[in-house]
Image (cartoon, grey):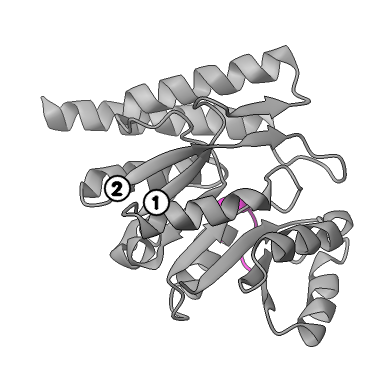
Amino acid sequence: MRVAVMTPTYNERDNVDEFVARVQAAMPLADIFFVDDNSPDGTGNLVSKYSTEDSRIHLIARSGPRGYAAASREGLVAIATKNYDVIVTIDCDLSHDPTVIPEMIERLSSGADVVIGSRYVPRGGVRNWSLFRRLLSRFGNLYTNLMLGANVRDCTSGFRAYKTSVIASGVISSTTSNGYAFLSEVLMKICAKKQFAVVEIPIVYVERVAGVSKMNKTIIRESMRLVTIWGLQRLRRKS
């Protein structure tokens, strides 16, 4: 399989070197795509330098609306046109362990269409989170799963592997949400298709050390609001 590893970035310069080293150690033949939102800290410039030295490293420099959703949407759709079999999405903040990627690829080879790195299946977990954040994330995922009927324990994990055929079906390009609600919306659209097999494998999420988290109360409230709207719409369609 031809594999692309995609990471949306904004002010992640301090993590780029270690991120590249970890991904290439786990997947030496994969191409790495940084989708950068014109980071003022020079993330894009550093990646551009890498790309001149290593043909497997690529920069997608964005100048449009910023944000995780916009960057992910643009990056996934663009990369899906480049004849890759699989696209893996992973955070650049070193919270996700790239050594899990080979298992993701194996599960795709065995029949799955989407593999989610899950904190909430057996052997999954988180490190360096406060009790409040653990409870908030648990409740948020339980609520999202209930409202969307996704049968997925970790609806908000950004560590995923997609067969390119899933992206070509339009589940990414048809999304409209901003922020991290994008992850739940994609999952909702995938489940609505009823033609793709989604599986979860355990990961241990480690809170970032360098850089600043983009998660905030506004993003959380927006995600819960949208999930509620989508869930009520789903229930109306069923009634």
Viewer-closest of 44 and 19? 19
Residue behind mark 2? 197
Mark before the other along the chain sequence, 1 or 2: 1
Image spot of residue 173 (x, y percent): 39, 62
Q: What numbered label is drawn on residue 114? A: 1
Measured as percent of width and height from the top left, residue 123 is found at: 57, 27
Label 1: how many residues lie within 10 Å, few (<14), some (14-19) or many (20+)? many
Side of 25 where 183 appears, left or right: left
Answer whether residue 39 is visible to the viewer in this image. Answer: no
Instruction: Quarter of the image for the C terminus: give it.
Output: top left
Q: Is residue 72 above or below residue 49?
A: above
43 vs 71, left or right, is right
Chain part drawn in magenta: 64-70
Q: Can residue 211 be seen in this snapshot? A: yes
For the residues bearing labels 1 and 2, Cβ distance under 8 angstroms: yes
Camera-side residue of 104 and 68: 104
State the separation of the CA atoms marked 1 and 2. Answer: 6 Å
Residue type pointed to by label 1: Val
The residue depicted at 58 percent of the width and 29 percent of the height is 124
The amino acid on which the numbered mark 2 sits, given as a three-letter code, is Ala
